[in-house]
Image (cartoon, grey):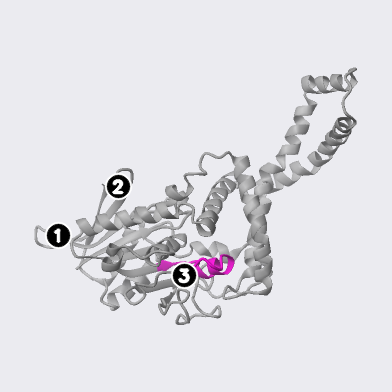
Amino acid sequence: MNKVGIYISGLGQSFHNENVEKYAERFRNELHFNEKGSNYALKSEIITYTDKKTAKVVRLVKEGLTSSDEVAYTFYEFEYNELLTERFKRQNILLKNLILFGLVFKKFPQLFKRIFVQDHYNRPYLSFYAFFILAFVSLAVLFLIPATLDMLYEFKGIKSILEGIKNSSIEFPPFIGEVYTRTFPFLKEIYKWTVPVTTLILITVPESKTIVTSIATEFACADRYLNDGIQSQVILGNLDLLVEYIVENEPNSKIHYHCYSFGSLIAMDYLFPLGSIPSTNAKLHSEVLITIGNPYEFINSYYSKYFSNRSLVLEEKIKWINVYSISDALSSNFRNDSTRGEAMYGLKNSSLKPENINYEITPDKSQNFYNFITMDGIRMHKLYWDSETNGQSCVRLIVDFLDKQAIL
């Protein structure tokens, strides 16, 4: 049986150069540790599975004594980031700030509600604080608008023109004069505190422009994907085409979906679609769903109807492995508490529950004031592997589980 993995990264990982080659290298390292005397090489290529889309393919080849090498595992990379964000890439930073602030403002009622009605998600205070910081950062550029207008007013040419108009014999309606006399002194007062606040943001968050640009695009696109289904048909359609390519070019293939963070939602949308059924290829060839840092509980809490009315055709066939961390505020342990253990529930209205695998790199931390202010729980969402592929990672637990279950 030909084992094929589709690697679906997190939404923001494209900014940190995380890709299928790094994941495959971590996978290979674990195979080396498990099988003494064996050696696996990585062989990469680029394939075209539609007229416009390409995918990187990495094969783990077991080098033997004979002239022919055995392909032990094949990874295909599904890149959805461009598909999800393409509509927003050409927007200027001012518009992105406005979009980000508007989306955060729109979510505040739900954030307040979750403080008092927590549902399964047990860190609503941290979410509220994180959204507040996003709103604050998004104001960095907006704060500069009054200062810019005031600066323009101080230019001699513009100032003299305005003063000339004011002193001319032209009669303006009273309200125009009132706006004039009140606006510019007001701008001067705003200028005194907007610049220090903006400077504070830039000092506290040195890459604030980059952060706002990337977060505004990602958050806006993710919200529209989750709330309105925008770009979901394009993304899932392309995943369908990649699976079709795999089925046609990898004989007797069984497909494993290796997903991190937002990529987990893409795979779940594909395998358990809303208002549709999985494709024939998905039904015949999908075997394992691996979710790492799955934000299921966060999404279910703030987009409460998102996982309702799903097709459950594959609930009896799919093996679901879920890697989570107690330290990670965004990952789901599919339990009614924040402890380690077997999953108590799974996909909404489904009998399918994941096989929970706990992965930690730090001892359990108390929710003290410092950890809260520094958003430690959100920063820990990146703990599942280091940027260096030679470090330990959660992939060891995944490989070990697949091997024990005779799935590898």
* Quarter of the rendering occupied by the N terminus: bottom left
Disc 1 residue crowd, few under 14, some 14–19, many 20+, Cα 10 Å: some
**Picture quadrant of residue 18:** bottom left
Q: Nearer the viewer, residue 67 or 240?
A: 240
Is residue 100 on the magenta stretch?
no
Q: What's the distance in space between the residues labelled 1 and 2, CA to CA?
A: 29 Å
Q: From the viewer's perspective, is the residue at label 1 or at label 2 nearer? A: 2
Report the amino acid beneath label 2: Thr
Q: Is residue 241 above or below residue 322?
A: above
Disc 2 residue crowd, few under 14, some 14–19, many 20+, Cα 10 Å: few
Residue at image coords 30%, 43%:
51
**Picture quadrant of residue 67:** bottom left
Magenta residues, start to end: 291-309
Whether residue 206 appears in this view of the structure is no
Which circle marks residue 50 in the picture?
2
Whether residue 7 appears in this view of the structure is yes
Report the amino acid beneath label 1: Asp
Report the amino acid beneath label 3: Asn
* Quarter of the rendering occupied by the C terminus: bottom left
Which circle marks residue 69 in the picture?
1
Residue 57 in the image, given as x and y percentages of width and height: 28, 53
* Label 1 secondary element: loop
Residue 90 in the image, given as x and y percentages of width and height: 52, 39
Which circle marks residue 309 in the picture?
3
